[in-house]
Amino acid sequence: MPWITYVIIGFVVLILIPMTVKIVAEYERGVIFRLGRLIGAKGPGLFLIIPFVDRMVKVDLRVITMDVPSQEVITKDNVTVRVNAVVFLRVVDPESAVVKVLDHIRATSQISQTTLRNVLGQSELDELLSQREKLNETLQQIIDEQTDPWGVKVSAVEIKEVELAESMRRMMAAQAEAERERRAKIIHAEGEFQAAERLAQAGSIMAKQPTTLQLRYLQTLTEVASEKNSTLIFPIPIDLISMFMDKCNSQSGNKDNK
């Protein structure tokens, strides 16, 4: 019964082909173990392995976006905040990612959580709010150093949200309002000071050159006359009155002498 033999052979071939022929995509690598010993990483494309002897573990080389759960952190100035972040990582050494760590994604997540608490706990609240880029770089360097033996590269760490208590938010809003009022008062005082300086300079010039006062008087009359007013008030400079008073006093003195 040769046909039974052919059926058995065909059945065995159908079983062995998927176990022998392996295909990995461009963004993957296949880490091969032969009888438990590491052979190396293969791919991308098609390659053969020995059935029942070799075992392959696929590793994805694409960038993985991993969310770091919200962590409660006490800052250096004793303010409690809740902070979450996002970590961008990828495998650069597939052999180390399989051999040296059980689950490189979970291990990186745990390292990221502890590092986030440690780094932000050494920073003040103002630094956390205003110098976020600096903290991101510090977090990236520390986490990348920890994951480097696992063949994992952490390319970036971004702090997403910083949640403050309601009482702290009210205090910060009051502080910001007080700061704006302080700046407004300073600007107003500087304006008054500059105006006083200008008036003092103008008064000094008018005192040295009385004709400027007369010109200013005529300009004021022109501005008042341009308005449609029923009543006009003409201010008379004291210098003009003093001239007439001096003249009258001189004439009365001459009459007394006669």
Image: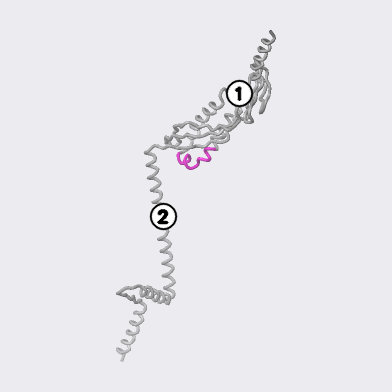
| Numbered label attached to residue 98 | 1
Q: Secondary structure at mark 1?
A: helix
Q: Residue furthest top?
A: 1
Q: Secondary structure at mark 2?
A: helix
- The amino acid pointed to by label 1 is Val
Left or right of 145? Residue 45 is: right
Residue at 43% of width from left, 64% of height from top? 197
| Numbered label attached to residue 43 | none
Q: Tell me which secondary structure the magenta stretch mostly adopts.
A: helix
Q: Residue furthest bottom?
A: 258
Q: Which residue is mark 2?
A: 186
* In the foreground, 213 or 253: 213
For the N terminus, the quadrant is top right
- The amino acid pointed to by label 2 is Ile
Left or right of 257? Residue 159 is: right
Residue segment shown in magenta: 125-136
In this picture, is 184 found above or below 129? below
Q: Position of residue 219 (x, y in %)?
A: 40, 74
Left or right of 1? Residue 91 is: left
* In the foreground, 138 or 31: 31
For the C terminus, the quadrant is bottom left
